[in-house]
Amino acid sequence: MRRTIAPLARKLGTRMSARRRRATRGHIDVRRTLRASMSTGGVPMRPAYVARQHGRPDLVVLADLSSSVAGFSRFTILLMQALAGQFRRIRVFGFVNIADELTDTIVGAAPGADLTAAFGDLSRMTRWHRNSDYGAALRDVVDRYADAVGHRTTLLILGDARTNGTDPAYDALRSLVERARHVVWLNPEPARTWGTGDSVAHRYAEIVDMHECRTVAQLRRFVDRTMPV
């Protein structure tokens, strides 16, 4: 897995940096452009821009680590770890039906460290069962980790949005959307299955920007073109 992530992260990191430079360039500064043109006979050879002061965003990852989507979530978290330099700060939360912060274990780990135990220990992410409960996890983040999401935060949610018939807590998701700068959801299930069975993906997709992400190619395209920088 890490052999795939390392070259992918290097390539995507370069592209994200280029996107950030373009995004922060801003509009043309007429005065500076005209002043610079004095040295070229009044012909503006290169426009000067007013820089936008955005800075790097904070990234918060909220990942379903139940067995049905654990592989996808682990791969994506490791990619975000490899791209840590693109963000001001990263915090990682895993859940099955309770949210648990994994930041120190994952983000603070040395490159190449074995994180199997961190991903596999579900004891602090479950109550009395091991079925996903998205509503409970979302409320947990709102109630216990309110400081994690703010106006500089890109919140990245990973999971299939299958609630096992539990309350989906749309209000909690809306609360996070109101707090964050961006909220994006990556769903490893085909878009055609959203809303089938116990899936409420189609309803969550009305609240947040949800993307089908089933392959490395789809994940690469998302980070390269869509992920907020």
Image: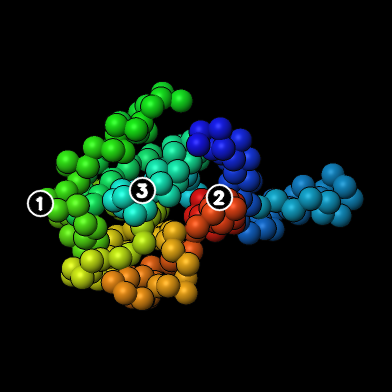
* Disc on the earlier residue, 1 or 2: 1
Q: Residue at x 43, y 49 (%)?
A: 72
Which amino acid, mark 3? Ala
From the viewer's side, name the closer residue of 6 and 52. Answer: 6
Tag of residue 216: 2
Residue placed at 36% from the left, 57% from the top? 159
SS category of the residue bearing label 1: loop
The residue depicted at 54 percent of the width and 54 percent of the height is: 215
Answer above or below: position of 132 versus 210.
above
Write down the residue under mark 1.
Answer: 128
Q: Which of 69 and 40 is in front in this view?
A: 69
Check residue 40 in the rendering and tell me which mark sits there, or answer none.
none
Q: Name the residue under label 3.
A: 70
Residue placed most toward the observer, 114 or 138 = 114
Q: Is residue 55 left or right of residue 159?
A: right
The answer to whether marks 2 and 3 mark residues whose Cβ atoms lie closer than 8 Å is no
- State the CA–CA distance, disc 2 to disc 3: 15 Å
**Residue 147 percent coordinates (x, y):** 23, 48
Q: Tag 2's secondary structure?
A: helix
What amino acid type is highlighted by mark number 1?
Answer: Trp
What's the CA distance linking mark 1 and mark 2? 34 Å
Counting residues from the N terminus, which is met first, the one under dot 1 or under dot 3? 3
Identify the residue at horizontal 48%, vertical 64% (top origin).
212
How busy is the neighbourhood of tag 3: few (under 14 within 10 Å), some, or many (20 plus)? Answer: some
Image location (x, y in percent) of residue 88: 42, 39
Q: Which colour scheme is used?
A: rainbow
Q: Which amino acid does label 2 sit on?
A: Val
On the picture, is 45 further left or further right than 93?
right
Element type where label 3 sits in the image? helix
The tag earlier along the polypeptide, 2 or 3, is: 3
- Nearest to the eye among marks 1 and 2: give it: 1
